[in-house]
Image: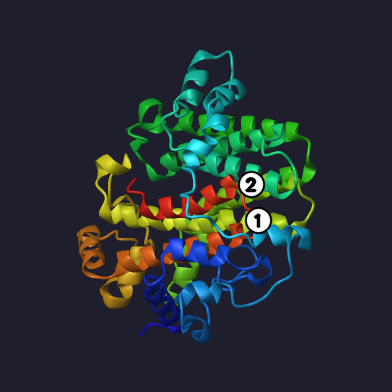
Amino acid sequence: MAGPWWRHCRRWTANCATASLFETSRYTNGRSASSLGRASWSCGPGNEAQPPSATQTRSKTLNLTLSLIRHKSRLPFPSRQSRCCRTTHSDAKPKDPFALAQKDLTSLYDDIKKELFVSKEELKFLCDYYFDGKGKAIRPMIVVLMARAMNIHSNRAGDLLPGQRAIAMISEMIHTASLVHDDVIDGSDKRRGKRTINVMWGERKAILVGDFILSAASMALARIGNITVVKVLSQVIEDLVRGEFMQLGSKENEDERFKHYLEKTFKKTASLIANSCKAVSILVNADPEVHEIAFQYGRNVGIAFQLVDDVLDFTSGASQLGKPSAADLKLGLATGPVLFACQQFPELHAMIMRRFSSKGDVDRAWQYVLQSDGVQQTSFLAQRYCQEAIRQISMLRPSAERDALIRLTEMVLTRDK
C-alpha cells in the first residue's frame, strides 16, 4: 500500500490540474507581498520533502495555489516597496525571457572561450567543443533575468554589474563541465545532437577537459572578489558530486525512495540554478530574505525543469531530445514517472532495486509507465514546483524581468526538448 507521503502526493498532484500557472500568477500578483508565506512542503537544503497538509489540499478555490499563500510571513523588504508589489499585472503578455536576456547573452560563449584560452591547440578545441552557441543557455538566461530583477528591486538600474555577468558565465561553465563528466560516468555517446567528447577523444581526455573547465570557472569566480558569493557557488560543486553519488544508490522504502529522488534532483540540477540566482542577489542586496527569494525561485524552477526532463524521456523521441529516449531506464535510474507507476504496478519494485539489470526489465518498465499515470503525476508535480516559483518571485518589485521569470515557468512545463 502507498504510504502517507504517497497519498498526499497523489492528492495534491491531482488537484494541481485544476489551477493553471496563469491563474496562479494573476492571483498571486493581486495580493500584498505580506500575505505570501513560505511553503513547508518543498525539498532542498534544510527541508525534508514533506507534502502539504490535508487541510491545505482542500482549499475551496484555486486548490493548491491558495494553499501556497495561506500563511503570513514578514516582508522581505521595506513597506515602501510593498506598496509597489501590490500592483497587479496588466493584460499585456510578459516579454519572451530569451528575447529579454538576449542582449546580455550575446557575447556569452565568446567570453567563455576567452576564459578557456590555452596555447595547446587540442585542449582548446576540446574545451570549446560544447560552447558553440547551440546550447539552450537556460541557466545563464535565468541568472541574467534574476540579476536585473534584483537590481530593480534594490533601487538600482536594471543593467548587470560585472560580477553578475560573470556569474551567468560561470553557471554555464559549471553546467557544461558537469555534462562532460556525466557523459563519462553514463557512457553516453550523444550530447546536444552530436557525439560526446568521451566517444570522440576518449574518457581520459574528457575527464581532464571537464576538470579544466571547472578550474577556469573557479578562477573567474575568485576574480569577482566576494567571499560570500564564492562560498555560495562552491556549494554547487559539492552538491553535484553528492548528487552523483546519490544517483548510484536507491532506497528500499517507497517514501524514502521518492525523497531520495527529489533530493538528488535538487543537488544534480537545481542547486546550480538556485545558488547562481542567490549569488547575483548578494551582489546588490544585503537582506538575507531577498537572497532566499532568489534561491527558492531557482530551486523550484530547477526541480521542475528536471521533472519535465524525466517526463520527456518517456514522451519524446531521440530526435527531439538530442539523446536516446529511455536513457534513464537503460542507466538503471528510476525517475518520477517510474516511481509513480510503481504504485499501480508493484512489479516495478523489484526492477527498481536491481536497477533494471535483468533481461527485459527496461522494456517491461517502459510499458508499465505508459500504462500508468506516472507521466501525468510527474507533470503535475512539476507544475506544483512552478507554482511555488511564481509565488516566490512575485514578492519582488514588478519589472519586465520579474514577469519574464514568471512566464519562464510556463515555458519549462511546455517544452518538448
Mark 1 surroundings: few (<14), some (14-19) or many (≥20) residues within 10 A:
many
Q: Nearer the viewer, residue 409 or 115?
A: 409
Q: Amino acid at mark 1?
A: Leu
Crowd rating for badge 2 (residues with CA inside 10 Å; few <14, some 14–19, many 20+): many
> How far is the residue under mark 1 from the one under mark 2?
8 Å
The foreground one among 264 and 65 is 65
Q: Say whether residue 60 is left or right of residue 393.
A: left
* Left/right of residue 373 with respect to residue 65 in the rendered view: left
Depth check: 14 or 323 in front? 14
The tag on residue 38 is: none
Residue at left offset 43%, top offset 39%: 184
Q: Is residue 296 above or below residue 15?
A: above
**404 relative to 34, above or below:** above
Q: Quadrant of residue 336?
A: bottom left
Q: Earlier in the sequence, mark 1 or mark 2?
A: 2
Q: Quadrant of the C terminus?
A: top left
- Which of 147 and 205 lies nearest the eye of the viewer? 147
Residue 245, visible in the rendered structure: no
The reply to whether discs 1 and 2 touch (Cβ–Cβ < 8 Å) is: yes
Tell me if residue 358 can be seen: yes
Relative to 29, is 340 on the left or the right?
left
Q: How many marks?
A: 2
| In the image, residue 109 above or below residue 358 | above
**Residue 144 x, y percent position in the rendering:** 59, 40
**Residue bearing mark 2:** 149
Q: Residue 9: image x %, image y %?
A: 43, 76
Q: Residue at x 74, y 42 (%)?
A: 156
- Per the rendering, the mark at residue 396 is 1
Residue 94 drawn above or below residue 368 = above
Measuring from the top left, give residue 91's x and y in whole percent: 47, 55
